[in-house]
Image (cartoon, helix red, strand yellow):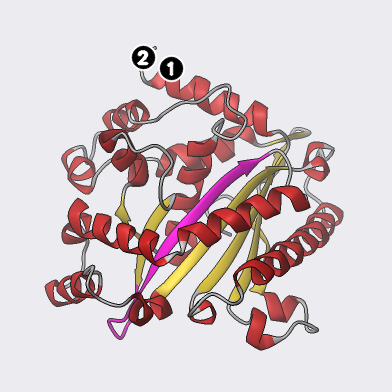
Amino acid sequence: MVGPFEIVIDTTLIEAFVDLDRGSFGNKSICSLANGFEDGAWRTDTFLDFVWDNISETALSAQERSALEGRPGSILRQSAKNLRLTETDDIGHGSELAEILLYGIMRHKHGALPVVPKIFYKQNRNDNAKGADSVHITVYDDDTYALWFGEAKFYGSIESSALGKVVTSVKESVKTEKLKKENGIIRNVGDLDHLDLSGDLVEAIKDDLLTDKSMDELRGKIRIPILLLHTCGITAKTEKWSEEYVETVRSYHLERARDYFEKQFESMGDMHCYERMEFHLILVPVPSKDDLADRFVQHARTTRGE
């Protein structure tokens, strides 16, 4: 499990589709996570509890989290105050919900550490929806590391037209100038200094992120998690967890993942050092985007005292 979510798929693309060329598709993986059911209904409260349990990693700076440690009510209230709640725009409605979910998944699935609290950063820089939706680091036993620049989307559909928009967004996010901007943010925000990492490793990472360094040297350490939280007709019609539900979602998500990655390779395959980066597609189905986003916004406003 990842938090409260059951793992439906967790595999590489070429393991799922043996007919695909390893050289073109060997740097891609698929993860599908599904929430459960209770009393004939999808467990909305369980889903939102996970979101609120992980909100501070993206809505508060490391210093704020440390100052509010042991005060869960204050952490939630201050985190909610940093949200930019959108209730009308079809693209923006629920976008921060998806960003928070990605922070939680990165923490629970990969043991990743947040190095830029994106919602906090955008709130305090008046920088709306620019750059990666999440920035994390994973550190390995040999003191090597990987940087994760995440995309988080909440769509009413993940059919082909929507996937094309995701490809465009991901392609833009991995351009050299965009990655160098993210590297500068990591260095300037300062949260790296507050993680439980050795001083030598922190200095080595900061040195790698200097703007005069070639991105060619860093791309082998870059991972792109792509979270697609989406309305799912299968989930909307389901009342209880079953093997039939799991298999139906698995089949649908494998089909959508192949479609997405084929579109991505067609658009990005000739990009310099494309094959050195890893791309991790994460699919999470919900019964209704609008209903879930409305519940999230309502709770946030109540928490803020509005």
Q: Is residue 285 above or below residue 33?
A: above
Distance from label 1 to label 2 (Cα)? 5 Å
Q: Position of residue 34 (x, y in %)?
A: 67, 51
Question: Residue at point 62% right, 50% down?
Answer: 228
As drawn, is 169 to the left or to the right of 178? right
Q: Is residue 185 magenta?
A: no
Disc 1 marks a residue whose amino acid type is Thr
- Give residue 131's mark: none
User: Which corner quadrant of the image does residue 256 belong to?
Assistant: bottom right
Q: Looking at the image, which residue is at 39% across and 37% down? A: 128
Q: Which residue is under mark 2?
A: 305
Q: Nearer the viewer, residue 60 or 238?
A: 60
- Figure label count: 2
Name the residue rendered at 58%, 33% in the picture.
Answer: 45
Q: Let me know if residue 140 appears in the view.
A: no
Residue range highlighted in magenta: 139-155
Prevailing secondary structure class for the magenta stretch in the rendered image: strand
Q: Which residue is mark 1?
A: 302
Q: Is residue 143 within the magenta segment?
A: yes
Element on which disc 1 rests = helix
Nearer to the camera, 95 or 252 = 95
Q: Can residue 132 be spotted in the picture?
A: yes
Disc 1 and disc 2 in contact, CB within 8 angstroms: yes
Quadrant of the image containing the C terminus = top left
Find residue 289 and report its image quarter.
top right
Q: Residue furthest left?
A: 199
